[in-house]
Image (spheres, grey):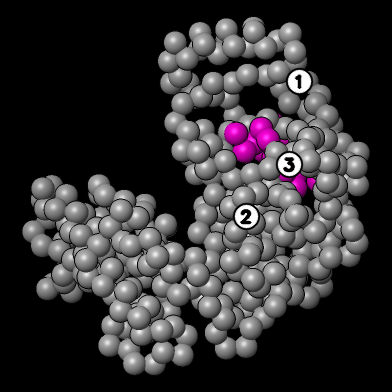
Amino acid sequence: MKNTKQVIALASAAALSVSVLAGCGGAASDATSESTSTATAEASNTAASDGTLVLAETGFEGKFSPFFASSASDQDVIDLTQLGLLGADRKGEMILNGIEGETREYNGTDYTYYGTSDCVVTENDDGTVTYDIKLRDDLKFSDGEPVTIDDVIFSMYVFLDPTYDGSVTMYSTPIVGLEEYRNSMSTLSKLIAEAGEDNTDYTNFTEEQQKAFWDAVNDGGVKFAQEIVDNMMANGATDVASAAAGWGFDGLAADATAKDFFLAIGEQYDWSFSAMEAESAGSALSELIPEDVYAYSTTGVNVGNAVANVAGIVKTGDYSMTLTTSELSTTMIYQLQMPIAPLH
């Protein structure tokens, strides 16, 4: 699981749809135009004879991956085509007995909810919490391959990998052994940034990689930050420090430069270039930094003693596993609504 390039490459290609649809996501945007609604109705009427459901939506970015979808429209596609490990009822409360189903009342009507798995949550005497997960054994992906607990564990490891730069935040949960696992690896961009521009120790990267990184920072990175500064100067800021503060980055020195600002942005986002895109005031960072350097933030480097796996994730059978957290977490159970992507 520590082969980061393999994990992320598989993850990027893992938008394979599943043959069992556990539930639907939200409706299309209320802002859908009348013409789109008409087209949808016509398409649905045409397709009704062969049992096909046709939906129309706007705003697609084309990231139809359960790991990297970011727009609401792309996520709607994911919700309609991917299995979730756990689901929720109409009130947003988790369904923990999905195999046999749970009946819940809503607005005076009983609804029975089914899902892909059962989950038993146990608070242990030592303060740890164990999530005992049992997966249905009759599920298949759309290519006919069975869905097993290996697919669940694979999907978890993608979200927990130090180089993962999607929007899911499972890495912030207190899973036992997760901190050690993540700390045994860093990204190339973070290592070079933390070493500094005058570094002469090339243990974890080459001198050429270091030069390419800082050339990109001094050119594209500075331009990225300067666009923010210019935007804020047009709205009352008087210098880089006040512009940065107005943008949400307090604490820069009074004589700070656009480069200092960019370094602060990088530190804030742990030098994940894709995450830093959220701060754009115009240009995308990917347009300002060379592609090979941009990839540094998804290039994993083992540091110190490599930890091969997360201790709190344990396979107990072909269709079962346990996940243990070091403490009770209010968000852990909701993170288990994660999609199940095919390891194969």
Pointer 2 or 1: first along the chain: 2
Q: Tag 3, which secondary structure?
A: loop
* Residue beneath the point at 84% across and 53% down: 148
Q: Which mark is residue 11?
A: 2
Task: Residue under label 3, please give it.
Answer: 83
**Would residue 186 be seen by someone viewing this image from the given angle?**
yes
| Camera-nearest residue between 247 and 49 | 49
| Camera-nearest residue between 139 and 93 | 139
Q: Amino acid at mark 1?
A: Gly
Q: Tag 2, which secondary structure?
A: helix
| Camera-nearest residue between 169 and 236 | 169
Q: Quadrant of the N terminus?
A: bottom right
Label 3 packing within 10 angstroms: few (<14), some (14-19), many (20+): many
| Percent of width and height locating residue 248 | 29, 58
**Would residue 91 be seen by someone viewing this image from the given angle?**
no
* Circles 2 and 3 in contact, beta carbons < 8 Å: no
Quarter-of-image position of residue 188: bottom left
* Residue beneath the point at 24% across and 58% down: 224
In the figure, is residue 258 to the left or right of 21?
A: left
* Residue beneath the point at 74% across and 56% down: 343
So how many labels did they put on this image? 3
Label 1 packing within 10 angstroms: few (<14), some (14-19), many (20+): few
Q: From the viewer's perspective, is the residue at label 2 or at label 3 nearer?
A: 2
Vertical arrangement, residue 179 with respect to residue 133, above or below:
below
Span shown in magenta: 77-97
**Residue sticking out furthest to the left:** 238
